[in-house]
Image (cartoon, rainbow, N blue to C red):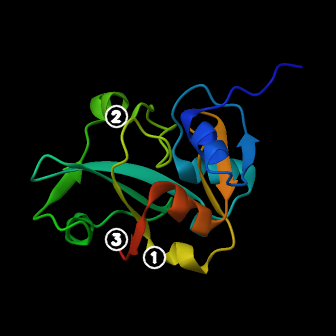
Amino acid sequence: MAKEQKTNAMRMLDRLKIKYEINTYDCDEFIDGVHIADMLGQDYDSTFKTLVTVGKSGEYYVFAIPIHLELDLKKAAQSVGEKSVEMLHVKDINAVTGYIRGGCTPIGMKKQYKTVLHSSISELSRVIISGGRLGTQIILAPSDLIKATAATLADIVQ
């Protein structure tokens, strides 16, 4: 049997000696997180999507929120000390993060960007995030996700 090919996110977690589980599913094109959670019977509140923004300053910021919620751009900007932030264009995701749409995870990007996780994560025992490619998820303790991304927590949803 072929060995699971590790993503940057998995390699980084291994380096940090952080325990995680991998969940894989069949997927060859982008499907939004809600449909994937429905398909896999996962809880929306503990399954987080990764969103990348660019601030007025030109700096990039990473936000992770439950899949069924919408990022509040004003709250997001405030949480990182920017006047405003806007969503990164889909065509720029790979160049900025090293990941593709649907496989973007806050762990192991090309560069460590300031990362903010929705504050609800502190109420969870485990969180599900993208594993760094389509069809792969990483499941880990919220405290380990915070450690791996040097994230702060804030109320960043509408």
| Residue type at numbered disc 1 | Ser
**Residue 143: where, in percent of width, then height?**
59, 69
Residue 31, label in figure: none
What residue did someone put label 2 on?
93
| Residue type at numbered disc 3 | Ile
Residue in the foreground of this view, choosing between 40 and 96: 96
**Residue 58: where, in percent of width, then height?**
13, 46
Residue in the foreground of this view, choosing between 12 and 35: 12
Question: Which secondary structure, mark 1?
Answer: helix
Q: Name the image quarter holding the N terminus.
A: top right
**Pointer 3 with pointer 1, Cβ within 8 A:** yes
Q: Is residue 134 left or right of residue 52?
A: right
| Residue type at numbered disc 2 | Ile
Label 3 CA crowd tier, 10 Å (few <14, some 14–19, many 20+)? many
The residue at 45%/32% (across/down) is 99
Q: Of callouts 1 and 2, which one flags the residue occurring earlier in the amino acid sequence?
A: 2
Q: Residue 71, located in which quarter of the rendered image?
A: bottom left
Does residue 124 lie above or below 64 as drawn? below
**Residue 73: where, in percent of width, then height?**
23, 63
Residue 156, label in figure: 3
Q: Is residue 142 left or right of residue 49?
A: right
Q: Residue 29, located in which quarter of the rendered image?
A: top right
Extreme-bottom residue of the structure: 123
Structural distance between the alpha carbons of marks 1 and 2:
24 Å
Label 2 CA crowd tier, 10 Å (few <14, some 14–19, many 20+)? some
Question: Which secondary structure, mark 2?
Answer: helix
Label 1 CA crowd tier, 10 Å (few <14, some 14–19, many 20+)? some
The residue at 71%/31% (across/down) is 26
Does residue 89 lie above or below 59 as drawn? above
Structural distance between the alpha carbons of marks 3 and 1:
8 Å
